[in-house]
Image (cartoon, helix red, strand yellow):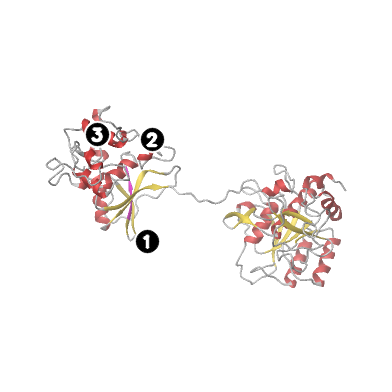
Amino acid sequence: MTLPRRVAGLMLAATLFAATPAFAQTNDPSLTPQQLDCLSRATAATAADCLQPGAQPTPGGPGSGGGIPPRAVGLPELLVDLFPNPGDFPGVASGGQPATPVPTPNPLRDPAAASPDPSGGGAQAGGQPTPPPPDVPPPGTAITAPPRAIAGSFVPDEVLVTVDGGAPVAQAVAAAYGLEIRSQRLSALLGTSLVRYGIPDGRPVGTVLAQLAGDGRTATREANHIYELQQAAAGPNFAFQRIALDEAAANGENVSIAVIDTAIDDTHPALKGVVAGSFDAMPGVTVTARDHATSVAGLIAGTGPFKGMAPGSKIFHARAFEGGKSNMEIILNALDWAAEQNVQIVNMSFVGPKNALLEQASRGARARGMILVAAAGNNGPGAPYGYPAAYKGVIAVTATDAKDALMKQANRGPYVYISAPGVDVMAPVGGGTDLVTGTSFAAAVVSGAIANLLHNEPGRSAESIEKALAATATDLGDKGRDTDFGFGLINTKAAEAVKE
């Protein structure tokens, strides 16, 4: 019957080191504490017996009667070669390779390596520890080297160890194994001292973990594994494809767009140099949120790490909402300011009741040649019409997903004019990007698409663009214009081809 590979390896070690005591270490995480204790007292000739359940070493051998002090034991470099499978070796990085390849001395190939240089730390011949390296910090030092963010599955020259007994014990462990304390602190959650040890002499992480495994002063020993944040990558926004806009050619230069919304994070990398003017229609009201306007503006004109529908266009931002709410006076004030800036497009990602003043203001803006784009609303199929979207001369936008299905919460009605992506689209938010959903963001996509049309044909009128969008939209739902999708999904390329 063929012996298991590990048993065969240990028997090979017993043959090679029959005249010397076995070192009480293994890097096999599956061994029980009893088996590890057995190994710590076993001779090379009886080490293989320790792998049998409940086995004890042969009495009278060099490992009995006290044996080698557990804290002084070391791992012969040969044992590393006995476990060629990376899965058996806890210090091996993902892919089966050490995070940083380090030559491992082998006494069979290089006899000089059997006696490590005392200056490099580690165990001396006979299993006795070397004196502490001169650069080991005194007990109680909190941090002597800052943590590093590196590539790979773990830091190649560090281990994390919990130690009962505080700084004196942590220092003693460092001295016994030729390690250096890079940081140590009392962990409230772990309930013990956590020490980050550095390995100054190039030993593999797995070797050091195995050396520490039998030391009763240490409770937990681990590689300093690397963890990565799992933030979704921005990548190409599916909105470009769905509205037939070439991302590489998207351009809104020389087009100005007013965004009437919440406060904005104009320091966001995606909005660098994008905001050309700002107006606070709510002075004295504390700012509590910036994400909504940041997402809307980013979808329209984002640049750098996040590309909007019309990069190069200029945003004129009016803060008119806080806590998701505003009032008519504030909105009218913001609209007046936008008109004074001679903007070409006004994005209104908000909905409210019918108001004669807002209707009048919308007519006045349209008479100036301003193109008004508004969210149709997120209040469901049975909701009343949403304004200003439902006013004549305002392009009411509803939201669809990546498969052109209508957002379930979208308002319905004959005022819905056009559809655009607005379900789980990637957009800038405070601190990065995130998926956003709502007719607010579909309106922003349409505003960006229209900016491209104006960039390519600067003199184009609002009426011409409105008609082109309707004539070229990809029909969705019932044939022709319907109360769910309006004329259908915006097709920027086709609308561009329709000249005034």
Q: Are marks 1 and 2 in contact (CB under 8 Å)?
A: no
Which secondary structure, mark 2? loop
Q: Quadrant of the N terminus?
A: top left
Q: CA distance from mark 2 to mark 3?
A: 28 Å
| Helix, strand or loop status at disc 1 | loop
Residue 378 locus on image (x, y percent): 70, 64
**Dot 3: what SS?**
helix
Residue 474 placement, left or right of 26: right
| Magenta extent | 194-199
For the residue marked with disc 2, what is the amino acid?
A: Pro
Of the numbered discs 2 and 3, the one sitting upstream in the chain is 3
Q: Earlier in the sequence, mark 1 or mark 2?
A: 2
The amino acid type, in three-letter code, at marker 3 is Met
* One can see residue 110 in this view: yes
The residue at the point 73 percent across, 64 percent down is: 377
Residue 403: in magenta span:
no
Kind of residue at disc 1: Leu
The percent coordinates of residue 400 (x first, y second) are 71, 55
Residue 230 drawn at (x, y percent) = 52, 51
In the picture of the structure, the residue carrying the numbered disc 1 is 189
Tell me which corner region of the image, top left, top right, bottom left or bottom right, holds residue 332.
Answer: bottom right
- Front position in the image: 167 or 497: 497
Q: Residues within 10 Å of mark 2 (few under 14, many from 20)?
A: few
Secondary structure mostly seen in magenta is strand
Residue tagged 2: 101
**Residue nearest the observer in this picture, 101 or 73:** 73
Report the Cα–Cα distance between label 1 and label 3. Answer: 42 Å
Q: In front: mark 2 or mark 3?
A: 3
Q: Earlier in the sequence, mark 1 or mark 3?
A: 3
Compared to 371, does 204 lie above or below? above
Task: Identify the residue shown where x is 18% and y is 43%.
Answer: 57
